[in-house]
Amino acid sequence: MRKLAVWSERCLDLLLVWRGWLFAAGVLVTLGALAWLTAYPLRYNRSMEGFFPAHDPRLHLYYRNKEWFGGEATLLVVYRGARP
């Protein structure tokens, strides 16, 4: 138990000594992340096709359903469970 106390005290001393540099490094990492996110913004594919892998047979069923209902973004979900 004594070794753990000595080790944690040493780590705390290092953190206190280097706190200015650690803060500066944190600010630089944050600014770099913000610069990267503004240069390459996240884009989401919110279409129904984005929910399926390209070769999923259910995607072809979705396309057929889309044809039948006139191109509307319709998705039918059926749950089959035991009847009470």
Image (cartoon, rainbow, N blue to C red):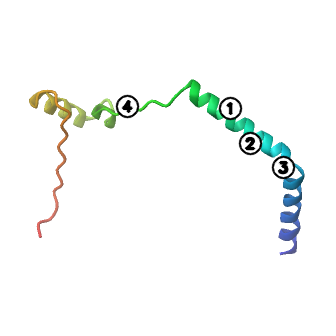
Q: Position of residue 63 (x, y in %)?
A: 19, 29
Q: Amino acid at mark 2?
A: Gly
Helix, strand or loop status at disc 2? helix
Q: Residue furthest top?
A: 39
Residue annotated with mark 2: 26
**Measured along the vertical axis of the image, is residue 29 above or below residue 22?**
above
Cα distance in 3D space between marks 1 and 4:
26 Å
Helix, strand or loop status at disc 1? helix
Q: Is residue 25 left or right of residue 82?
A: right
Residue annotated with mark 4: 45
Q: Position of residue 37 (x, y in %)?
A: 58, 31
Residue annotated with mark 3: 19
Cα distance in 3D space between marks 3 and 2:
10 Å
Crowding around mark 1 (Cα neighbors within 10 Å: few <14, some 14 to 19, many 20+) is few
Residue annotated with mark 1: 32
Taking the spot 45% from the left edge, 30% from the top edge, the residue there is 43
Crowding around mark 2 (Cα neighbors within 10 Å: few <14, some 14 to 19, many 20+) is few
Q: Is residue 50 left or right of residue 57?
A: right
Quarter of the picture containing the C terminus is bottom left
Do the residues bearing badges 2 and 1 touch, measured as CB atoms within 8 Å?
no
Sequence order check: which comes first, mark 3 or mark 4? 3
Crowding around mark 4 (Cα neighbors within 10 Å: few <14, some 14 to 19, many 20+) is few
Do the residues bearing badges 3 and 2 touch, measured as CB atoms within 8 Å?
no
Sequence order check: which comes first, mark 4 or mark 2? 2
Taking the spot 87% from the left edge, 74% from the top edge, the residue there is 2
Sequence order check: which comes first, mark 2 or mark 1? 2
Taking the spot 90% from the left edge, 52% from the top edge, the residue there is 17
Q: Which callout, 3 or 4, points to the residue nearer the camera?
A: 3
Q: Amino acid at mark 3?
A: Arg
Nearer-the-camera pick, 27 or 13 = 27
Quarter of the picture containing the N terminus is bottom right
Cα distance in 3D space between marks 3 and 1:
20 Å
